[in-house]
Structure formats: structure tokens, C-alpha cells
Image (cartoon, rainbow, N blue to C red):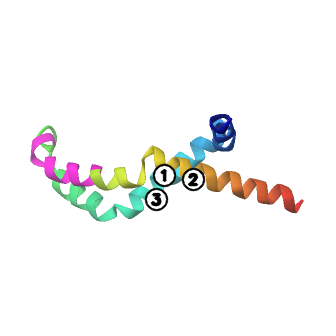
Amino acid sequence: MGYLQEARENHVKKKVEEALRSKMKQKALKECDFYCSKYAECARGRTFSVVWQCRKQAKELNECLHQYTNDAVLEEMKKAYMIEQESKEMNQ
């Protein structure tokens, strides 16, 4: 029973999930702006050599982004959304 209950609690519509993913990505880019700038600076003026010349900056950026864009973060955002929706329904 616990698994079904949890599945119902975490279920949101596809459009809502897409919006939450977009919000999650925006927050990640904002939080990792320093690493984005470092990578962009390294990549400026390069084409194919970006792959090996900016490997360190790309790794740092990806590590930072992963902190803010993983399944656990998305699940927390879904829970918060569901709680917010339940609260709105009760207040109506």
C-alpha cells in the first residue's frame, strides 16, 4: 500500500512536470553561473578544440549542474507542488 500511496502523491500531469523541469534547469543555471562563465570564456573562439581544451571547465560545470538537476530535486519540487495544490483546493 505504501508504494501506491507514494506513487499517487508524486503523480503530476506531464505539462506540470515539464514546467517543473524547466524551473529546475533555470535555477541550476543561475546557481552555476560562475562555472557557466568559466566554460564560456574557455570556449570563446574555439570550435573542435573545445572538447579537449575546456574539459576541466566542462566537468566543473556538469558537477555543479548535477547538484541542482537530479531526480531527487525534481521529486522534492513535485511534492512541494502537490502540497501547494492541496492547500489551494482546501482554501476554496
Mark 2 and mark 1 in contact (Cβ < 8 Å)?
A: yes
Choose between 18 and 41: the one closer to the eye: 18
Residue 14 part of the magenta segment: no
Residue 1 vs 89, above or below: the answer is above
Span shown in magenta: 51-62
- Relative to 55, 9 lies left or right: right
Drawn side of residue 11 relative to residue 47, left or right:
right
The span from disc 3 to disc 1 (Cα, nearest Å) is 11 Å
Q: Nearer the viewer, mark 2 or mark 3?
A: 2
Label the magenta part by its dominant secondary structure.
helix
Residue 43: horizontal and vertical position, in percent?
18, 50
In whole angstroms, how far apart are the C-alphas of marks 2 and 3? 12 Å
**The C terminus is located in which quarter?**
bottom right
Label disc, if present, on residue 3 of the rendered structure: none
Which label is found at residue 27?
Answer: 3
Per the rendering, the mark at residue 73 is: 1
Q: In this view of the protein, which residue sits in the foreground, 25 or 71?
A: 71
Q: Position of residue 84 (x, y in %)?
A: 71, 58
Residue type at mark 1 is: Val
**63 on left or right of 54:** right
- Which quarter of the picture shows residue 37? bottom left
Give the residue pinned by disc 2. Answer: 77
Quarter of the image where the N terminus is located: top right
